[in-house]
Image: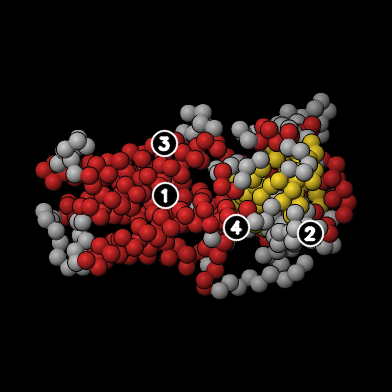
Amino acid sequence: MAKYSAARPWLQTEAFWLLVYVVLVVGPLALLLLGERPRPGGFVWDFALALGYASLSMMGLQFALTARFKRATAPFGIDLIYYFHRHLASIATALLVVHALVLLLRYPDVVGRIDPRTAPGYMTAGWVALMAFLLLVASSLWRRLLRIEYDRWRRLHVVLAVVGLAAALWHVLGSASYLEPRWKYLLWLGLGVFWLGLVAYVRLVRPAWLLRRPWKVVEVRPERGRSWTVAVEPEQGPGLDYEAGQFAWLSLRASPFALREHPFSIASAPSRPGRLEFTIKELGDFTRTIGSIQPGERAWVDGPYGNFGVRRFPQSPGFVFMAGGVGIAPVISVLRDLADRGEQRSLWLFYGNRDVERIVFREELEQLASRLNLRVVHVLGEPPEGWQGERGFITAGVLNRHLPSDRDRLQYFVCGPEPMIRLCERSLRQLGISLKRLHSEIFDIA
């Protein structure tokens, strides 16, 4: 395998980008404290307004988190960035709610009437922003409960985010609290332009770039477990330069402007350039129709993203993979690549499925086991009669029965839904293995 430097420049570390985020949120807020404070003053007033400005900063930066800047997301993995994005939106909205309640209860005369027919426009804009952000968070947290179709939810999500941010900016600039002298006003106006510029970049500039680089579907084949493999090739020019284990956003039967892209792990290996394969299970609104895709249809690919791969660990004596169902997709990419490169280190795959007929790539895994120093351990929830293998879930007991005594020197990779990742974390802790050695790919980042 090619060598991968373990030492990273400061600009590529998690600490640096976390510091950048904190500075971008706290920095503009701290600058507002310079100079005289507006009426009515006092700690409660200052605290309430600080919550409002902090919430606006956090909401504005949400567009940066979803802009897929590779340099900023690489240290974390973009799946973790989206997870971070989801929780920060809830925190920012909570801050905004507290901001509004404190002012409404403590300073009703300053807040004035809520009725939009008599209230100043900038105050009405503040209430519009609050309602937009509340609807945004509620529709995101309870999308499945509310039965909102994914693509429709994405469009609603974008509209609510833009309306909320624009209304919040109108409210802040209209009230002008803490925005004297004029340079403070211009600072926050500039921040607003920057945040809305991020929206234009994500929804207009990036899709326009992708539109110039179309791909075409060359094969659609069924797999076990209600899964399909969709193979695409570029219509012209080179393919995608990626590492085994990464993923990409795939658009099918819609242009990149349509907000109908979906993240899928790349199942093919970079050792076989040109062609990309995505193995997709029929799980959601879009994926239920994946089997109807026909060769020759156009596609667009935005990627690669993620850092779910083994090339960062050239000194590791071996690797352990844990996957559930179609979570095998990034793992099969890594295994195919390792086999093509003649890897000799020890490998283990713990693969959980409900039954034998749902084991995706079952025959290929047997072939890969003969080409690699790979031990495949199938864990079935509903095993057939006479099954001699592992049952239930991938627990500490299962791992303990198959891993060597020096297991604490290995690197561990898990791909699946959050409950599976939590179970793997608990299992590794029970075995005395540091979670620093666990690298996860969250299965559902939508």
> SS of the residue at dot 2?
loop
Closer mark to the observer between disc 2 and disc 1? 2
Query: In x, y percent, where is residue 276?
Result: 75, 52
Q: Residue at x 75, y 69 (%)?
A: 2
User: On the image, numbered disc 3 is attached to which residue?
Assistant: 138
Which badge, 2 or 1, comes first in the chain's sequence? 1
Mark number displayed over residue 209 = 4
Q: How is the image coloured?
A: secondary structure
Q: CA distance from mark 3 to mark 1?
A: 13 Å
Q: CA distance from mark 1 to mark 4?
A: 29 Å
Amino acid identity at mark 2: Pro
Which badge, 1 or 4, comes first in the chain's sequence? 1
Instruction: Using the image as rendered, state which of residue 313 and residue 140 is in the foreground.
Output: 140
Closer mark to the observer between disc 1 and disc 4? 4
Amino acid identity at mark 3: Ala
User: On the image, numbered disc 1 is attached to which residue?
Assistant: 88
Amino acid identity at mark 1: Leu
Query: In x, y percent, where is residue 1?
Result: 77, 67
Q: Are marks 4 and 2 in contact (CB under 8 Å)?
A: no
Q: CA distance from mark 3 to mark 2?
A: 42 Å
Q: CA distance from mark 4 to mark 2?
A: 22 Å
Q: Residue at x 76, y 38 (%)?
A: 294
User: On the image, numbered disc 2 is attached to which residue?
Assistant: 273
Q: Residue at x 52, y 35 (%)?
A: 152
Q: Are marks 3 and 1 in contact (CB under 8 Å)?
A: no
Point out the image quarter for the C terminus: top right
Closer mark to the observer between disc 4 and disc 3? 4
